[in-house]
Amino acid sequence: MKEHTRVVVIGGGIVGAAVLYHLTKLGWSDVVLVERKQLTAGSTWHAAGGFHAMNSDPNVARLQAYGISVYKEVEEISGQDVGMHLTGGIQVAATNERWENIKYEHAKHKVLGIDSHLLTPDECKKLCPIMDTSKVIGGLFDGNEGNIDPYGSTHALAKAARMAGAEIYVKTMVEDLVHKPDGTWTVITDQGNIQCEHIVNAAGLWAREVGAMAGVHVPTVPMEHHYLLTGDLDELTEWDGELPLVLDLDGEMYLRQERNGVLLGVYEQNSTPWAVKGTPWDYAETDLLEERLEDVADALEKGFERFPTVAEAGIRRVVNGPFTFTADGNPLVGPVRGVQNYWSACGVMAGFSQGSGVALALSQWMINGEVDGDVFAMDVNRFGDYSTDAYTLEKSVEFYENRFYLLCPNDEWPAARPHKVSAFYDRLKNSNAVFGESYGLELPLWFAPQGTDPVEQPSFRRSNSHDPVGDECRAVRDGVGILDGSSFAKYEVSGPDAVAFLDYLFASRLPTEGKVRMGPLLLPSGRMKGDLTVMGIAEDRFMIIGSGYLQEFHMMWFEQHVGDYNVDIRNRSYDLTTIVIAGPASRDLMTSVADGDFSTEAMPFMSVRSMDVGLVASQVARLSFTGELGYEVYVPTEYAGPVYDSLLDAGKQLGIRQFGIRALVSMGMEKSFGIWSREFTPDYTPVMCGMNRFIDYEKADFVGRDAALADREDDHEHKLVALEIDADTADAWGYEPIWMGDEYAGYVTSGAYGHTTQKSLALGYVKTPYLEPSGDDLAVHLVDGVRPARILAEPPYDPTALKMRG
Ligand SMILES: Cc1cc2nc3c(=O)[nH]c(=O)nc-3n(C[C@H](O)[C@H](O)[C@H](O)COP(=O)(O)OP(=O)(O)OC[C@H]3O[C@@H](n4cnc5c(N)ncnc54)[C@H](O)[C@@H]3O)c2cc1C
């Protein structure tokens, strides 16, 4: 066994083997994998081995498609048979809502890079003769699906890695991890110690235990899962084809062929978490869990309805095995904040769809310092301290039981709520707020009319929120509105080197004291890393504002770059609360409550002042996401409630109205303002997304400067544009394709109805050839069909920004 190496990967399941292979593929050969038993000794060995590229996140879908292509690659390199059955897969719809959704998803596959097509019930039957299609409305076929041999695929990855120089030590148990002062590690195993630079936790079922060895909390929980293998079916014995992987969404089960029988798996409603308090070390490769057929009987019955001859074939074997889930079903990948050189490759619920994609992203991150594309959907740092074990348990159960739930874009799942609430929660609740959840926090989406239930009907079309949100927008545009801004992240950077540090970190010029500036962050590759707002509070003190759900993501970035700069970086997201005031009467409101001069001369747009608001020392910034005159008030959280009350009281005579995030988004869309995770992500460069106007290219140095300079010279395939759509009952949500006749011209990133302009609006990336001169003849594929659309030359509301700046 080596005593020194560059990387130790802990765990020899499909994920650990894929990580080892990808580290070598990207050029690091001095790497080892340590496995306490044999390769595949965790969840991997008893998996059904099904794979598919479908995922609602385009980058995860791209990584899954890549992962499928790796199986053949490692089979060729290693000579190890991976047992690949590329049968294609069908998603089956048996309700009208599901069928409408499937057609919508099919349109979006163009954007996700998935080459799928719709099927009639007869075509479903032809591909899957054992299906009773009497209740089937249609299906969606993707040729890039099938199943793989878990043993063969894991061993092929491992062997290919070995052939490139990696070493694998089986029957070697990692017992402890010691973090050394220089950031490197000692891996203590029962076979001796290994010194290394990086650790990768790929310990699957035992990820929590391996995390604890380094003080890292891993928010996953294993869930029991059943599938059964049948005896031979006559139809299959006599047939020379092979069944596709079938996902029966309304039947809540999946099925594939196994020899002349089938494998049928279910996601039952009364699910069973397993080993909640920790995975026993003696759970080994030959164990399976006791079958609980009575718990899955209802689900199986549904399956037998769709596949009647399966019931007759008899059950040959029942498998009940555990695998790990996270609160949102996505993996936990990347560097762990606060623990240098500790990497997570955990919580991979669909290891055969996602293993190599996870491994590629992780290896790029470790070797190149960044991933090629946006992988926030699986970033380990998307969770914060709110994701306790109890929270993860409730959310994972909810996710498991809703695996095939028809999820609408306005759906808000109820488990583990409320968990974290703002200082205004009770006030908002009493005002009939409908809440959403972000980063564990309850936030007001909109306010239901008094006397009605504060509940939003899940829908792909305009919901019961449409009219109340319209009322909120009009109240803001005509008078003044107030919004709970608790979901904003606030960071404070201070100290002798604050200017030097932030000047290097941000691509923009820094604001001087009393000023506010947009602060784009870039990756070394020049792609976007952040879209923050920077406020100059004092010469050596800055407040930085961003989206609350990105707290760990941003704090990690600050900490990774702080080096020897003499600065203090604090996440003040919890101890400060933001109140947003917007509308033409907001100056009158602020003047009546705060001790400050709100004239444009004294407090112009993009400025910040310290003053008392009510009784409380606060920072007030003149900013606007609504396009109206507006202010953001930053107060210590313990004072926030009374300040909110005093603003509401004083605003009564001005007709103040509480508004929610939906109205904010609608008004922002009327100004063509983009947001992070939609228009701005690491997929885009500043020139592509229009952030270049905030970059100071003359600055001597900043992260990503060379690439940003080159970005200005590049011909970009896509550019961000604002669109108006001739919509009817539904607006765009995101990832809908944009067409020019039959040609694919781009995709929507977000959409909303503009209640003031009375237009259905969207932002999206359009391929440059379609921008001019024919940008008038576009069409967007919405849930209710293909709708004419055109590019807007300027924001549809107040294009000269007089209202916001006046
Ligand atoms: C019944 C069932 C059906 C499934 N069907 C599918 C499917 O069709 N498609 C799909 O994509 N996924 C499926 N899955 C899920 C899939 O099995 C998992 O996503 C995948 O196996 C996770 O792999 P992993 O490498 O992360 O973890 P694991 O397979 O759990 O591997 C972790 C490894 O780490 C080792 N280890 C842990 N601690 C230590 C230590 N301290 N020292 C050394 N080694 C250690 C363990 O021994 C183990 O080998 C199924 C799972 C089950 C249970």
Image: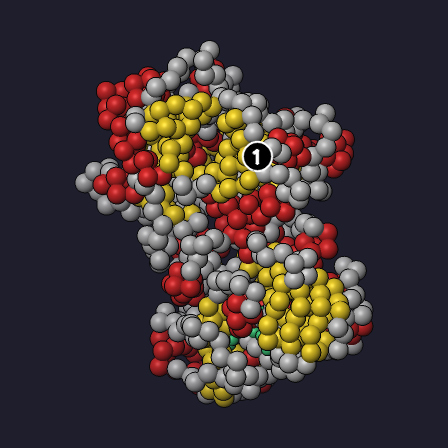
Task: Judge left or right: residue 68 versus residue 544.
Answer: right
**Image quarter for ligand 1:** bottom right
Residue 582 position within the rendered picture, expressed as x and y whole percent measured from the top left:
38, 25
Instruction: Identify the residue shown where x is 55% and y is 56%.
Output: 380
| Residue 336 visible in the snapshot | yes
Residue type at mark 1?
Gly
Task: Judge left or right: residue 158 versus residue 292.
Answer: right
| Residue 12 visible in the snapshot | no
Seen as rendered, the residue at the extreme left is 451
Instruction: Identify the residue shown where x is 47% and y is 23%.
Output: 608
Residue 258 position within the rendered picture, expressed as x and y whole percent measured from the top left:
57, 81
Q: Quadrant of residue 70?
A: bottom right
Instruction: Identify the residue shown where x is 37% and y is 28%.
Output: 617
Q: What colour scheme governs how the chains and residues are painted in the rendered image of this protein? A: secondary structure
Residue 114 position within the rendered picture, expressed as x and y whole percent measured from the top left:
62, 55
Instruction: Identify the residue shown where x is 30% and y is 25%.
Output: 614
In this rendered view, identify the residue nearer to me: 501 or 454: 501
Q: Is 135 drawn above or below residue 626 in the view shown?
A: below
Mark 1, Cα crowd under 10 Å, few <14 / some 14-19 / many 20+, is some
In this rendered view, identify the residue nearer to me: 670 or 506: 506
In this rendered view, identify the residue nearer to me: 655 or 180: 180
> Disc 1 marks which residue?
495
Task: Judge left or right: residue 430 versus residue 598.
Answer: left
Residue 374 position within the rendered picture, expressed as x and y whole percent measured from the top left:
61, 48
Question: From the Cβ of disc 1, is ligand 1 less than 8 Å away?
Answer: no
Q: Quadrant of residue 165?
A: bottom right
